[in-house]
Each structure stands twice: as structure tokens, then as C-alpha cells.
Amino acid sequence: MLDRPHPTPEAPTTDCFALARQLSGRHFIGGRYVAARSGASFPVVNPATGEEVARAAEGDAADVDAAVGDAARAQKEWAKVPARKRGALVHQCAAIVREHVEELARLIALETGKALRTESRVEANTVADILEFFGGLGGELKGETVPFDPKVLSVTVREPLGVVGAIIPWNVPMLLMALKIAPALVAGNTVVVKSAEEAPLAVLRICELLNRVLPPGCFNMLSGFGPDCGAPLVEHPLVRKVTFTGSVEVGRIVAKAAGEKLIPVTLELGGKSPMIVFADCDFDKTVAGALTSMRFTRQGQSCTAASRIYVERPIFDRFVEAMAAKVDAMRMGDPLDEATDIGTIISPEQFGKVRGFIDEGIATAGATGRACSALPADPALRKGLFIQPHIFTGLTGESRLVQQEIFGPVTCIFPFDDAEAVLAEANGTEYGLAASLWTNNLKVGLDLAHRLEAGLVQINQNLVVQANLSYGGVKSSGLGKEASLEAMLEHFTHKKTIMVRMD
Ligand code: NAI
Ligand code: MG
């Protein structure tokens, strides 16, 4: 248990505004809250109102050095803890997160603008689920015996890599962090996380909660900007593995720096995921599936969002109408209101970027962009970063809206006549993260599933990442897998061979 007093309450709290203030100005290093060494901080803004709700510690290379140093010292002891015991501790962390689900859900809604009922609470529960899943896998860190020579006992053992540097984005920061820290810790590594500038609070509180169970220094949290805090973390000589989720552009920078050091790197990058709908699909379920596939409740801020929807021509018009009507019925509003389905965009930068795509689509000759669901009328939300979901038809495959990741509530729908042609379209971007197919003809569905260039293909559903199922993209969407046992073994351990001459 952490020593008290702390800036934050020991018991769960639902006052996210007070908690945000209490979390201000701090990293979490070596088992305690510490201020940034430079004393610098930057604002954390509620995107629903534009108000500053906290100040985050602005980390730099000195903070990175302190955190990595503590993590490296802790790792020597942590690796000696039996693997199943490490797992049991991570499992115990899940129980604390479960006690704090409501608190974390409100805090993440406050800093990201994601609606409490449809997104934030779901994310907080998933964090606990991921910790429980990996917590049970300690005993799976097995090696092999190798039939080399009857007189030589030849075995492999799984060893941790050392200190893991984890860099996370703002869209689902708690969940994406859990996918990194849980397997890293169970495998005997220690971790330094660099949170996203836009969403540093909930992950910092989670770090404190988990440190009530984990030995000090095993899990450390820094906030700060990419070039000033993320880059020195990747470059630090004691960081022996980097795991990154974010944009393709920064993924390349991180991979280059890791390449210089010759350390392994896992990259979960962007997507432009196609959804292919055949006329024989279950129509109503597929329309509902399009809404969840597009992650409209997360304002489309998802790397697996179905941002390109291909619908077989006989049902195309009916599908567009039914989808628009359903999106229209979604309620946009205060993220902390239980009645809200859709909250806000994360930041003014992303707002501008998404609006730019929408304006370009609207200005495209022959294209139609339908704006769905009403903007909130509440004057308190006047400065909120709300964007109406847009459904575009009539765009060509070359359009920037069809080729690039928008990361906003914008989807483009196209009619198709031929399965081979639609497969070529679907595979025709630089991305290869996820895809979904909607048909009752499993012969066609499975054939296309095998030929789609994507790390994850789902037929007649489109769920978000799930514990136990390997997740990760091909092409520019990334390198390596997360969320599964194989991901833990392949990406957070190395295999050492030990040979013993017996005669
Ligand atoms: P980003 O890739 O710039 O940021 C992700 C993380 O990387 C943040 O923690 C950031 O501080 C860190 N970072 C930035 N520069 C770095 C550097 N030089 N070295 C080390 N770390 C660095 O993403 P951003 O700017 O928030 O969003 C831009 C676009 O990226 C979005 O519009 C979207 O298209 C995509 N994106 C994709 C995500 C995904 O889940 N695949 C998540 C977030 C963004
Ligand atoms: Mg960026």
C-alpha cells in the first residue's frame, strides 16, 4: 500500500473535476507522485467546454532518466518474483481497477470528451478484463526441450527484455495502455509509460492504483510532449523494448530510433478499415453493425473505424437511408450525461483536421455529405468540439477522404457490383489493420476473408480489440501483435537457449 498522504483520495471518487486538479503537475515514478524536474506544465482541457481542468507535468529527458533508472533497478527484483506470482499481482490490480471503474470512467470522459455510458465506462471495464486475462498467463511463460543430442540437455527459457518504454495515444488511452503494461509486467519486465498530451489524467490515476499492489518502480508514468519526452524514452540506453500506438508518421520515427539502438519495437498504427456488405446480409443487423463498426459513439476516433463502406448495389440506396436515419437518432451532448451517445472530438487540432476533410468532401463535385444527429443546444457546451457524423456518397477511390485516416465521425459509402472489384478497392490503401464482411454466404465471406490485407477480419460482426485474440496490422498499419498470449511471448520476452553436456 502506498504511503499517505497523497494528493489523490484513497477511496474511489466520482468528483472527476476535483480528481483532475489533484492529479495536476505530477508524474508517477518509483512508487510515488513526483513533480516534473523542470517544474513546467501544460493544460489539460475538457473538450466539451474548452475549460482547463488540470495541468499536466511536462516531462523531459531528465524525468525520463529518473523513471527509467528506477524501472531498471526494480526490474532486477521483479524478474526474480515467480512468474505465476507476478501474474497473481497483476490480477489483483484488476480488482482495484474494478472498484474504481466509475471514477475512471468519469475522469476519462472529462479529459477526452467520450460519452460516459457508450464509451468511457466500457473502456474502464475492459482495462480490468485485460489485467485479469494476462494475470492468468504467468504459468504460460514456458520454454522447450530441444532434441539436440541425447548426451546434451538442451532447453530454452523465456526471459524478460528489461525496461519497456510504452507510448500511447489519446483515443482509448487506458485500454491501449493495459494491452502493453499487463503482458510486459507478467513477463517480468518493468514499464515506463509516456501518456498522450491530450489525455494524461486517467492513466496517471491507474498507475497510482496499480502501484498499491506492484513493487515500487515496476510501473511508472510520465506526461509530456512527443519530441521532448517520448523521443528520449525511446532513445534511453536502458530501455530495451518500445511499444507504440499512434500515427503512422510518428510510428516511423519511433521505429527508426529503435532501429538505431537495435531494440525490438511493436507498432499499432492507423487504419482505413473497409466494411463490405452483400445484398444477402441480415439487413437490420448490418445497418446496426455499420454504426458500431464506424465507432460513431467514439466520434470515429478509432484505428479500426469502418471508414469505407462498400454496399452491393441492389441494397445500396436503402442501406444509406437506413444508416443515416439510425445515426440521426443518436444523441450528441455532454459526455458526462448518461443520456449522451456521442461526445466530442479530442482537441482543436483534431477538430480542424476532421472539419478539413468534411469541407473537402462537400466541395467535391458529384459527392454528397449528409450531416446526421443534431448538435447539442445546451449553451454550456457552446465551445465544445462537437462534429456531426457525416456519411459521404459519390466520392471516387482516389479522394483523400477514401485514402487517408480521418480519425473522425466520417464514413464514405460506395455501391459495388462485383466481389473481385470490391476486394481490389478494399485492399487499395496503404493500411491493413481490420476489415469486416457482412453476408450469409460463408463461402464467399471466407474466400474474401483470406484475401483481405488486414490483421483482423470479422464476418457479420465488428468488435473492438478483445483479450485473447491477437491484434495488429499489416502494411502501414503496424508491426507485431497485441492482446494475446503469443503477443506476450513474442514481444515481451526473448528465448534463451541453455545447453548442458551430460557425459
Ligand atoms: P501521434 O502519433 O502524434 O501521438 C501518439 C503518441 O506519440 C503521443 O503520446 C505522442 O506524444 C507521441 N509522440 C509524438 N511524437 C513523438 C516522437 N517524436 N517520439 C516519441 N513519441 C512521440 O498522434 P496524434 O498527433 O495524437 O494524432 C494524429 C493522427 O494519428 C490522428 O489523426 C490519427 O489519424 C492517428 N492516430 C492513430 C491512433 C491509433 O490508434 N492507431 C491513435 C491516435 C492517433
Ligand atoms: Mg502528433
Image (cartoon, rainbow, N blue to C red):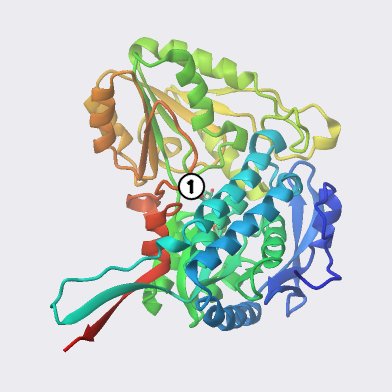
Q: Nearer the viewer, residue 214 or 503?
A: 503
Q: Is there any visible trace of residue 446 in the rendered image?
A: yes
Tell me the SS state at disc 1.
loop
The 10 Å Cα crowd at callout 1, few under 14, some 14 to 19, many 20 or more, is some
Image quadrant in which the C terminus is located: bottom left
Q: Residue at x 62, y 81 (%)?
A: 70
Residue at position x 73%, y 75% in the image: 36
Query: Where is residue 63 shown, x and y percent of the image?
Result: 66, 78
Instruction: Name the residue: 51% across, 35% down.
Output: 360
Mark 1, ligand 1, within 8 Å: the answer is no
Q: Is residue 315 above or below residue 342?
A: above
Query: Among all residues in the image, which is located at the extreme bottom?
Result: 503
Where is residue 3 drawn, in percent x and y? 80, 73
Query: Which picture quadrant has residue 228?
Result: bottom right
Quick one: 502 or 180, which is closer to the camera?
A: 502
Count the marks: how many?
1
Residue 216 rendering spot, x and y as whole percentages: 66, 75
Q: Residue furthest front?
A: 503
Residue 364: tell me if it is visible: no
Q: Is residue 250 left or right of residue 326?
A: left
Q: Which residue is mark 1?
A: 467
Question: Is residue 29 or residue 35 the one in the foreground?
Answer: 29
Q: Which quarter holds ligand 2?
A: bottom right
Which residue type carries mark 1?
A: Ala
When the figure is inspected, residue 462 is found, relative to residue 281, above or below; the finding is below
